[in-house]
Every structure is written in C-alpha cells, then in structure tokens.
Image: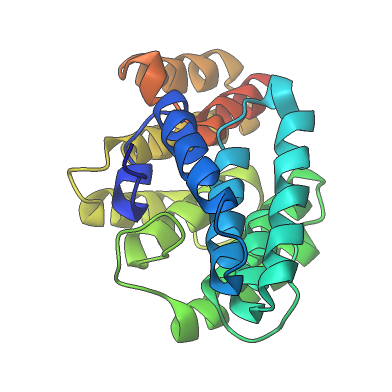
Amino acid sequence: MPQPDGTEYLSLGAADIQRRVSAGLVTVQQQLDNPRLWSVAASLMTLYAKTFPGSDGAKAVHWYRMAAKAADASDDLDTRVRVRGRAAIALSDKPSLGLLNALFGKAHTAALRGDHTTARRLFAEGRRVFDRAGSHEQTSDAVPHWRLNVFISLLAAASATRPPPYTAQDTATAELPETLPRFATHLETHRGLMLARSGDTAAGTAYPRAALDAPPPEKHSLTLRLLMAEVEQA
C-alpha cells in the first residue's frame, strides 16, 4: 500500500493515514540495519502519532516517544529536530521547519495559559525563523506563507497578540490552495474561537460546528477536533 506523501497528508483523513502508515512501518521495520531508514521510521511514527484523537492521548504520546527514539537512532539532527518539533520540543536553535512548528506550538500553549507576554515573544521569534526556514512546498511539515498565516490566525484568536486575527485569516484564505479545504475549516474554527473568547459563546460554537460538519467525519483531523473542543471550553 503506497504511503501518503506530504501533500496527501493535508487532505486525507486520520483512518486512511493510519492504514497507510502502518503498512509502511511494517516494511521499514524489516530494513532497520540501514541507518537512513531510522529517519524514515521516525517520520512515519510521528505521522502515526498525529492521527490519534484527544481521547487516545496516551497512544499519541507513546508514538511520539517511539518516534523520538527512532530519530535518535538515525543520528540525523534535522530528523531529531523535526520529530520533536511536532511535539513542540526543539533540540537546536538552528532555523528549521521543526523549530518553526515548535515555536508556534509553544506560543499557542502560552496564549491558552494567559501568558501573553511569552506568547508574543515566541510569535516574534517564529516570524524570524520563518524568514529563514519558510517553505513554498505544500507538504505536511512545510510552512508556506498561507500556513504561517493559519498559525498567526489561531494564535491571535486565542490571545491578545497582534496583528488582529482578521488580517491573518483573510490572507490565509486568499492564498490557501483549493485542494486543501481542511485548512479552510481550520480558519472557520479560529473565527469561532475568537467569537467565543469575546463572550459570544453561542455563535462561537455554532459557527465552527457548521464548518466542521461540512466535510465527512473521515476527513476530520485530530487538530480540528481539538480546536472544536477548545472553542466549546472558551
């Protein structure tokens, strides 16, 4: 069974990704005498971890830890940074996509905790890293300009950071490839979060729920489900 490439990952549902990644892991497991394949295994495990819903958080953590061990076995620093970056832990301050994902992940966490000073600092650092490590590719870990604005939209909706979320949402919507409708749903969810945090809980919940119900459930991602839960708790 062919593995999902970076572009397919952005559009496939969690169940499809799990099936395809499982097949790839079985194949790679038989060839781990080749050090390069530890890097492949680490990437596959990271992708597998991202498919578990919040109710299976322990399983996701298990796979992230497995991925980190595989990355360490690869002796490849870029792989180690990328894998840990997906779990918002960076090993190196060298500008990279892993570090970029980690910084915005940490900024979002700080915003949710009400630590807006730290959120703004990490946001500014993330922008600097993007200037050196941003990518024009449309793959799972790549961060083109539209995806940077998806990050900014979420962070701005969740906190007092600037620029206002409208600016980032409009920019991301204008640049978003038509082949990636799931991220349009992300932006609708951000708008709902913004409404909920401004005090309009009813509209803030109804708005993203309608957007989330539009695609079939198999097209939902873990991130979208977590965002919806965040809106409902706002």
Q: Is residue 29 left or right of residue 3?
A: right
Residue 2 appears in the figure: yes
Above or below — where is 193 with respect to 43? above
Q: Residue furthest left?
A: 178
Q: Quadrant of residue 217?
A: top left
Pinpoint residue 167: horizontal percent, then vertical percent: 38, 56
Q: Nearer the viewer, residue 102 or 131?
A: 102
Pinpoint residue 193: horizontal percent, then vertical percent: 56, 32
Q: Quadrant of residue 168?
A: bottom left
Residue 234 appears in the figure: no
Pinpoint residue 192: horizontal percent, then vertical percent: 49, 29
Above or below — where is 121 with respect to 41? below
Q: Nearer the viewer, residue 68 or 25?
A: 25
Q: Nearer the viewer, residue 220 or 51?
A: 51
Count of marks placed on residues? 0
The image quadrant where one finds the N terminus is top left
Residue drawn at x 76%, y 59% is: 69
Residue drawn at x 66%, y 80% is: 77
Residue drawn at x 35%, y 66% is: 144
The image quadrant where one finds the C terminus is top right
What's the coloring here? Answer: rainbow
Pinpoint residue 170: horizontal percent, then vertical percent: 31, 51
Residue drawn at x 61%, y 32% is: 198
Above or below — where is 74 with respect to 228? below
